[in-house]
Image (cartoon, rainbow, N blue to C red):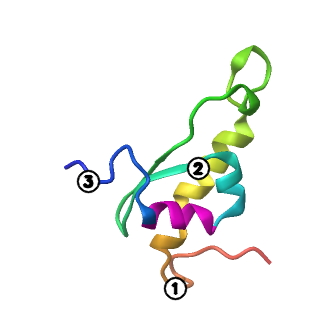
């Protein structure tokens, strides 16, 4: 099933990215965000690359971190589901 927001960042999805300043600065676009699925993208750009036009690992990890749990999909964290770093 294709989301009606596929390929565009609707107002709610754009607002979710705006809540994450690093993701917004990086240029992350959310295509869909629900409790069971999150889809997004990060366009290739020379400023996000290392040598030879290869996307920087930090940019890719920024995308992964953003899609891992955007604000629109946050739920309270129980000890059984969430790791804590102390």
| Residue 64 visible | yes
Snapshot quadrant of residue 51? top right
Q: CA distance from mark 3 to mark 2?
A: 22 Å
Residue visible at 23% across and 48% down?
2
Please state the extent of the stretch shown in magenta in the rendering.
12-19
Q: Earlier in the sequence, mark 1 or mark 2?
A: 2
Residue 86's place in the image compared with 58, above or below, is below
The residue at which mark 2 appears reads as 64
The residue beneath circle 1 is 76
Along the viewing direction, whichever of 40 and 69 lies nearer the viewer? 40
Tell me which numbered mark, 1 or 3, is placed earlier along the sequence.
Answer: 3
Q: Is residue 40 left or right of residue 5?
A: right
**Reading the chain from its start, which is encountered first: label 3 or label 2?**
3
Q: Mark 1, mark 3: which one is toward the viewer?
A: 3
- Asked whether the beta carbons under mark 1 and mark 3 sit within 8 Å of each other, the answer is no
Observer-nearest residue: 7 or 55?
Answer: 7
* Residue highlighted by disc 3: 4
Majority SS type along the magenta span: helix
Residue 53 locus on image (x, y percent) = 70, 18
| Residue at (37% x, 70% y) in the render | 35
Q: Position of residue 10 (x, y in %)?
A: 40, 58
User: Could you say whether the residue bearing mark 1 is in a helix, strand or loop?
Assistant: loop
Q: Quadrant of the C terminus?
A: bottom right
Residue 68 is one of the magenta-drawn residues? no
């Amino acid at each position: 099933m294709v989301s009606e927001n596929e390929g565009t960042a609707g107002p709610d999805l754009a607002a979710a990215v705006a809540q994450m300043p690093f993701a917004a600065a990086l240029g992350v676009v959310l295509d869909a965000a629900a409790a069971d699925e999150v889809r997004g993208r990060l366009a290739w750009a020379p400023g996000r690359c290392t040598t030879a036009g290869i996307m920087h690992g930090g940019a890719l990890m920024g995308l992964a971190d953003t899609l891992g749990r955007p604000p629109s999909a946050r739920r309270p964290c129980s000890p059984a589901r969430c790791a804590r770093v102390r």
